[in-house]
Amino acid sequence: MAEENPEPNKPEPEEFKFSGKAKLLATTGVICAMGGYICGDKIDENDKLNLTERPYEMAEQLLQEAAQKQEEWLEIKKNYQTTLHQKNLQIDSLERYIYRLEPYVKAYEEQKQEVQKIDEELQDFVQKYNQILTDYQNEENEVRIRDNQIDSLETLNKNYVKAIQDLNDEYKNRAPIENEFQAIHNCVNAHGETMYSYKFNGQVKCCIKHLKKLQKQYPNNDLTNIRISCND
């Protein structure tokens, strides 16, 4: 709590100095008048009474003015002391207010540090989350690629199964393979030994072509009684 400062020693106002000088002159005039002189000059009896009374009147007037100035100065001094006292009270109040605020300031600083710590942890969490998200997206892309590959394999498998099914449907009633070879052999050697070798490959292709045609026309035939000829 701030203590009230004592009033500093201030110089006397100029009005007081002026009044003091005037009072000194008036007193000197009185002494001169009482001796029958005006600053060394001799005066007559008629002016002596006036010169004796006037300094007293002047001195009284000056003293009244001095008293008035003194009252004004005392009022100023009182107001100054009142203002100073109020300022001291305000300072004391502020000091007490600051003292009461110290726990809150300390709590605020601690909370600020805690918030900063939480913010750092949050940033670290965000970085880890972003890394996990990136890894997940990469893994998701790899899974998508594998899914596409699996879909492609499944499509190929379906096509393969369909092709096998089509072949099975096409050849489910085919004659035994031995009968097919025998029919082709008979077709190729229909001319015996008279066929030139350069015609042999063409004869084989022709016989196979006719055999497939006959198989489609007669799917249930065992080819034992069919004679294939490429003599056309």
Image: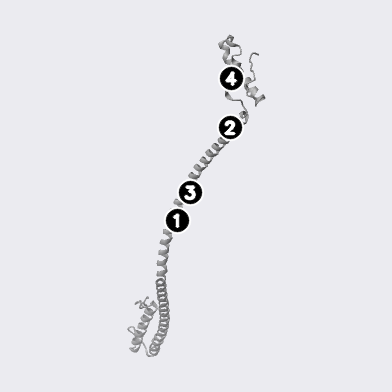
Q: For label 1, count other residues whose C-alpha is less than 10 Å away and answer few (under 14), some (14-19) or many (20+).
A: few
Q: Residue at x 54, y 37 (%)?
A: 153
**Looking at the image, is mark 4 or mark 1 earlier in the sequence?**
1
Distance CA(mark 3)–CA(mark 2): 45 Å
Pair 2/1: label in front: 2
**Looking at the image, is mark 2 or mark 4 earlier in the sequence?**
2
Q: For label 4, count other residues whose C-alpha is less than 10 Å away and answer few (under 14), some (14-19) or many (20+).
A: few
Q: Where is residue 228 shown, x and y percent of the image?
A: 63, 18
Mark 2, residue position: 164
Q: Where, by quadrant of the figure, is residue 174 drawn? A: top right
Label 3 secondary element: helix
Instruction: Please name the amino acid that badge 1 sits on.
Output: Leu
Distance CA(mark 4)–CA(mark 3): 69 Å
Q: Where, by quadrant of the figure, is residue 152 drawn? A: top right
Instruction: Please name the amino acid that badge 3 sits on.
Output: Leu
Please determine whether, in this image, residue 227 is positioned above or below residue 11: above
Q: Residue at x 60, y 16 (%)?
A: 186
Label 2 secondary element: helix
**Looking at the image, is mark 3 or mark 1 earlier in the sequence?**
1
Mark 4, residue position: 182
Mark 1, residue position: 122
Please determine whether, in this image, residue 179 is positioned above or below residue 152: above
Residue contact between numbered discs 4 and 3, judged by CB atoms under 8 Å: no
Q: Where is residue 48 shown, x and y percent of the image?
A: 38, 89
Pair 2/4: label in front: 4
